[in-house]
Amino acid sequence: MPAIREWPASTRPRERLIASGPQALSDEDLLAVLIGSGVPGRSAVALARDLLLALGGMRGLVHADHTRLRRLRIGSAQAARILAAREVGQRAIAAFADGEVLSSPEAAARALAPHFAHLDREEVKVALLSRKHRLLGVAGVYAGNVAGTSVRIGELFTEALRRNAPAIIVGHNHPSGDPAPSAEDLRTTRDAIAAGRLLGIDVLDHIVFGAGRWVSIGQGQSSAPPTAHRARAAEKGSDRDA
């Protein structure tokens, strides 16, 4: 297969990006621009195609680390560029939400989702809010492992107290991909709300993320129909509140 530099200029990914914009390129062409150069017998486009196939598409690329990319014939510098581009995109999305008023579960999920997009272990983060529920920032609270995490309730409020934030929204992810709240998630939510009352900090919601979906424990809303697990968890919460 000829090297990309030998292709007609109108078909080269970088030249097409410059001429028509990045939106005109396919996933593999965009990735080829980051990879830059191929290896003997394989162009950058072919390497990009192989990489996406091995990872199961762009979603798999989101979760790939440097070691995984290197195992798939991507050079160290090329892998670093891919990871840097991914992080820049995620930070740009997160920064866009700064200052937004989080007046609904949808708005809160939109602001928090980029912070959980590429995680393969369970993490807890809090959105710090003003009195009018304007987003002041997102703080990491705790990182567990693929099996889960356990957080002390007081840790949820550390950054809010330091920055005098009068309200927070708790968020965490389920590496399994199922955002259905567990019994422990429901208990954590109740305990956090109670602790917040003592500290003068409103806990407005607790949102669980998984595989591009989310569930609002506080507002009882979700981005997907309830699963049986979620329905059972909700029933348990109702029984305890009765």
Image: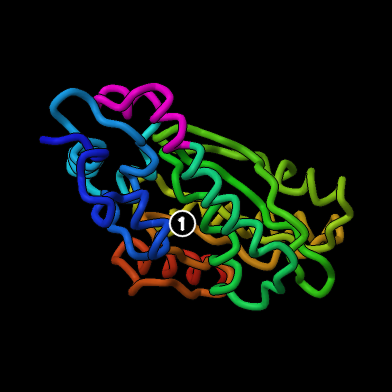
Query: What secondary structure is found at the residue carrying circle 1?
Result: strand
Q: Position of residue 1 (x, y in %)?
A: 10, 35
Q: Which of 4 and 205 lies nearest the eye of the viewer?
A: 4
Q: Residue at x 26, y 22 (%)?
A: 71
- 140 in relation to 114, above or below: above
Q: Which of 6 and 188 lies nearest the eye of the viewer?
A: 6
Q: Residue at x 46, y 30 (%)?
A: 80
Residue 158 colored magenta?
no
Q: Which of 60 and 157 lies nearest the eye of the viewer?
A: 60
> Left of 112 or right of it: where is 5?
left
Amino acid marked by disc 1: Phe
Give the mark count: 1
Q: Which residues are magenta?
A: 66-83
Please name the residue that numbered disc 1 is placed on.
Answer: 209
> Left of 128 or right of it: where is 112?
left
Q: Position of residue 16 (x, y in %)?
A: 34, 57
Asked where in the image residue 229 lies, by quadrant, the reply is bottom left
Farthest left residue?
1
Q: Residue at x 86, y 61 (%)?
A: 200
> Left of 177 or right of it: where is 7?
left
- 155 in relation to 211, above or below: above
